[in-house]
Every structure is written in C-alpha cells, then in structure tokens.
Amino acid sequence: MNEERIGYSSGWTVEEDPEGGFRWAAHGPGGILHGQAVTRAAAERAAQEAERELAAGPGAAGPPQVRLGPQPARIEEVLERTVAWARQQPDIRGLALVGSWARGGARADSDVDLVVLTSRRDRYLEEDGWTAALGSARVLRTEAWGPLTERRLLLEDGLEVEVGIAEPAWAATDPVDPGTRRVVTDGLRILHDPDGRLAALAIAASAGQP
C-alpha cells in the first residue's frame, strides 16, 4: 500500500489488486474518484491527478459524490482506434459494440463489450500481440461461451474491454442462434461490416421478436 495525505481534506491511495494490477483512490472536497491500472506507476499518476482535481472542488456540504468509470468521449476514442485496426485486418469480417454502451444504458462501472467476427479465430485466441492495437496492456482472462470466446482486456488507464471472438457463422440468419439473438437484441452498434453480415443479422434478430 502506498498512501499520501495532503492537508486534512485531500489524499490518495494505491494498493495491489490480488487478481492483478493496482487499485487507486483519491478524495477531496470535490468528492471521491477511484479506478484500476496495470502498473503501480500508472495507478499513482491517476491517483495524483484525481487528487489535484478533487482538491480544487467546491467542498460543498454533505457527503462527497462518487464518480467512477469512463466518459463517453473515452469510449469513442477506443472505438475509433479499434475500427481503424479492424479495417486493416482482411480476416475480420465484422466488428460491433454490444451491451450497455451500445443501447445507451451504460452505468459508471460498465465495461466496453465488442464482438469480432474473423475467419482466423485462433489468431486472436492464441496470440496476445493484437491487443496492443486497442491500447491493452494486459489480458485478464479468456472464457468460452459456445461459439464465442471472450477475452477481457485491461487498458492502461484501467478501462476494461471484453472482446468476443467468433467465426463469421456466429452471425448466421437462417436461423439466428438464440444466444446470438440475445446479444443482438440487448444492444448492437455496427462498427465494421464489409460483407453486410451484421446488418442482416440485426434485421433478422429484430424480426424474430414479439
């Protein structure tokens, strides 16, 4: 644990996460901020920046407000970077944002969920070098869900991104797989669709709803 106190109303802490990485927190008149980073140095920088921001806060009466999680502008930055990368990979036949950020219902602690359709699925499951294109510094875990395998990435600023890797057949429309339908109807924003596969899937999945 590394801790620094500034005056009586501001400070920050950094501690190692047992599951990997480092957690940081800062408090001051402006409220409380906390997050996660891959390295101690990155966590300390984030905590110090947050402490300075909060120290300049108004110090309003009542309990401090907790602010947590990425801002929409940060999400768009990650998406733009991912789309630019995907367009340079001939094997990627689809890229979509799914889940809460796609349907406009994200909370402060919501992850970014992506689906990548590729004809070279093993490349993204057996190798980690490609994650650098998304700004990832660490792969937290890999978990299979039928035809789709999720890889959870921790970006350097603490943002977590779940990338679901699947064959193009995941987007089959005749019929639409029930699991795929649930993902699509829960929120889908098409980011890269050179074959029109995801657009057709969105129409088919919606048509099957009551």
Image (tube, grey):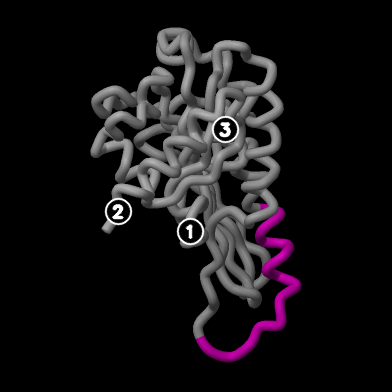
Task: Give the spatial CA distance, label 3 vs label 2.
Answer: 45 Å
Taking the spot 62% from the left edge, 47% from the top edge, the residue there is: 75
Badge 1 or badge 3: first in the primary sequence? 3
Residue 2 left/right relative to 175: right
Front-most of residues 187 and 71: 187
Taking the spot 28% from the left edge, 25% from the top edge, the residue there is: 144
Q: Are marks 3 and 2 in contact (CB under 8 Å)?
A: no
Q: Are marks 1 and 3 in contact (CB under 8 Å)?
A: no
Residue 80 percent location from the top left of the image: 69, 37
Taking the spot 62% from the left edge, 52% from the top edge, the residue there is: 47
- Label 1: which secondary element: loop
For mark 3, what is the residue? 39
- Label 2: which secondary element: loop
For mark 1, what is the residue? 106
Residue 146 percent location from the top left of the image: 24, 25
Residue 21 appears anywhere in the view? no
Front-most of residues 89 and 53: 89
Q: Amino acid at mark 1?
A: Ala
Residue 118 percent location from the top left of the image: 48, 17
Front-most of residues 10 and 210: 210
Residue 29 left/right relative to 158: right
- The vertical placement of 167 against 158, above or below, is above
Which range is magenta? Answer: 48-62
The nearer-to-camera label among 1 and 2 is 2
Task: Give the spatial CA distance, label 1 vs label 2.
Answer: 23 Å
Badge 3 or badge 2: first in the primary sequence? 3
The nearer-to-camera label among 1 and 3 is 1
For mark 2, what is the residue? 209
Q: For mark 1, does the 10 Å Cα neighbourhood hold few (<14), some (14 to 19), or many (20 or more) residues?
A: some
Whether the magenta-drawn stretch holds residue 39 is answered as no
